[in-house]
Image (cartoon, rainbow, N blue to C red):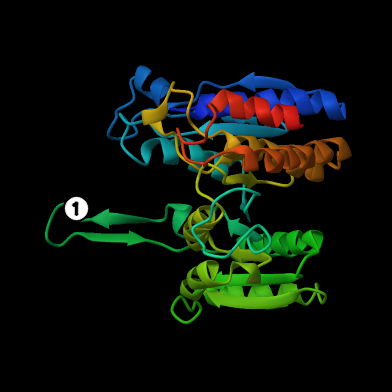
Amino acid sequence: MRIAVIGGDGTGPEVVAEGLKVLKVVAEKVGFKYELKKFSLSGDRYLAAGGDPNSQNIPVIHDEEIAELRTFDAIYLGAIGHPKVAPGILEKGLLLRLRFELDQYINLRPVKLYPGVWTPLKDKGPEEIDFIVVRENTEGLYSGMGGVQFKGTPHEVATQVLCDTRMGVERAIRYAFEVCRKRNRKKRLTLVGKTNVLTFAHGLWYRTFLEIGEEYPEIEKDYNHVDACCMWFVKNPEYYDTIVTDNMFGDIITDLGAMIQGGMGVAAGGNINPQSVSMFEPIGGSAPKYTGMNVINPIAAISALGMLLRETGNHRSNAKWVEAGDRVELAVMATTPKMKSQAAGKMGFSTTEIGDMVAAAV
């Protein structure tokens, strides 16, 4: 397996280092070879190259670097976000650009409460919080269509176009049905949208959902308005099995999902292109105030590594990689009950000690 490594900003390189520590052990245990190449893509590099901290005036990532990333089996990302660079510059210049140019059209977000992890939901435990969100990742309001006229005047007009295509919607829905079939749990796929207001775009989603659903008679087809979904995440998370939704709503509900599974310290996700290279990352940000203190929680980054192994193994039909990913997740589940908290500085262990514990559990 060839893995491109982007440590990124802040504590990103620290948590990635713990993931790579676990990778070394699980590769030896399961019996497969891998090679790594590190890419120095970060806010520091952007600024050092003369980037404007308030607007993107030079590329955050170059065309030749994107071309090289295409040649890897997977990308392992730590975090992007620099306190001296205005929000949006690095995110659009690197994260969104990679998603679009590598056509990573699925954002895959497991919402799973691990043993011993605190959740703000009273009387809910790991049995009740175990579902997965399939978010369309390259269209919708994130496509970049729109603009501003008369900026800075009383007559300023701003537009942001919600652009969904039948192709983009269909491939996301079909992927979600396949995920639900493989999970083989409740066999329920819930479409989350707002068909009563966004009648054109989400009408397309709903019609496509029903049409594709005819190919999966064994799976229950369910629908939630997004506001109702947010309520039920909190009230009845045990209801959900697999969720499919658009880019914007997926962005919102997966952060709510992260909180009910114990916070950003444990939440991991993947930006998926099943036919090409996918990128896996912890959901939390770069947390610059903790940089170099050895107190940040690496569980999310290690879980992202587990996803990288399992999902890439599934896409490449490599049973050893899948086994390695499952083993990493089991090792994480064996480690979380020993931790006092998932919050930075309150875990009862340092960042490197948690990495050692997961590696030992592997």
**Number of residues whose C-alpha sits closer than 10 Å to that of mark 1, classed few (under 14), some (14–19) or many (20 or more):** few
Position of the N terminus by quadrant: top right
235 with respect to 68 (left or right)? left
Provide the residue designation for mark 1: 151
Q: Can you tell which quarter of the image residue 321 is in?
A: top right
Up-down relation of residue 247 to residue 192 (above or below): above
Who is closer to the viewer here, 112 or 46?
Answer: 112
Up-down relation of residue 198 to residue 321 (above or below): below
User: How many numbered marks appear?
Assistant: 1
Instruction: Give the amino acid at mark 1.
Output: Lys
Could you say where residue 188 lies in the image, as x and y percent from the top left? 72, 72
Give the residue displayed 45% in from the left and 26% down from the top: 42
Position of the C terminus by quadrant: top right
Give the residue displayed 37% in from the left and 37% down from the top: 89
Q: Can you tell which quarter of the image residue 55 is in?
A: top left
Could you say where residue 243 lies in the image, as x and y percent from the top left? 63, 65
Could you say where residue 302 lies in the image, as x and y percent from the top left? 64, 35
